[in-house]
Image (cartoon, grey):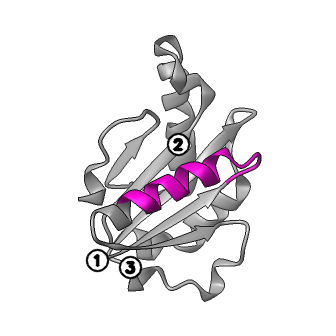
Amino acid sequence: MRILVAFGTLEGQTRKIAEAVAARVHDLGHDAHLFDTAGSPADLHVDSYHKIVVAGSVHHKRHQESVEDFVTAKLAELKKKPTLFLSVSLSAAFPEGMTEAQSYVDVFLAGTGWKPTQTTSRNRSLNILS
């Protein structure tokens, strides 16, 4: 199975998380392809992947513009596949910040029109990978 792990990062932490997700995909016996959303998605054929993970971090209450642009550009293809949106937020590190962290996800999804199969902003089992 081919799984795309697209990510946006400002300080490099989300890249590390995306790399860990890709390593887990490999451990499960699948092929993972990392894609930094800061690059041009024009040549990336999302429809050639079985599943897609999109990871973005929150800065100043918003996810990266490059992640938003990627999702918007590839929305039609994303709607046809099992997908996961992985939101990286410091707020999610604390139980009292979970409502705030979820609000960032809600704003992102409403703004892009994307309805991923699964979303998470916490370290939990990622069912989409199995």
Where residue 95 appears, as percent x and y from the top left, is 46, 14
Q: Quadrant of residue 58?
A: top right
Q: Position of residue 43 (x, y in %)?
A: 62, 88
Q: Which residues are magenta?
A: 9-24
Q: Secondary structure at mark 1?
A: loop
Q: Earlier in the sequence, mark 3 or mark 1?
A: 1
- Residue 1's label in the rendered image is 1
Q: Which residue is drawn at the image coordinates 45% and 51% (left, top)?
A: 85
Q: Spot the residue most to the top.
A: 96
Foreground pick, 110 / 30: 30
Q: Nearer the viewer, mark 3 or mark 1?
A: 1
The image shows residue 43, relative to residue 100, as above or below, that is below
Inspect the magenta stretch and tell me whether residue 118 lies in it: no
Residue located at (59% from left, 59% from top): 7
Relative to 85, residue 27 above or below: below
Q: Quadrant of residue 72?
A: bottom right
Residue 13 belongs to the span the image colors magenta: yes
Label 3: element kind: loop
Amino acid carrying label 2: it is: Ser
Mark 1 is surrounded, within 10 Å at the Cα level, by few (under 14), some (14 to 19) or many (20 or more) other residues, namely few
Q: Earlier in the sequence, mark 2 or mark 1?
A: 1
Mark 2 residue crowding within 10 angstroms, few (<14) / some (14–19) / many (20+): many
The residue beneath circle 2 is 87
The kind of residue tagged 1 is: Met
In this picture, residue 59 sits left or right of residue 90? right
In the figure, is residue 13 to the left or right of 124? right
79 with respect to 6 (left or right)? left
- In the drawing, does residue 46 fall left or right of residue 61? left
Residue 13 image point, x, y percent: 66, 45
How far apart marks 3 and 1 lie (CA) works out to: 8 Å
Q: Are marks 3 and 1 in contact (CB under 8 Å)?
A: no
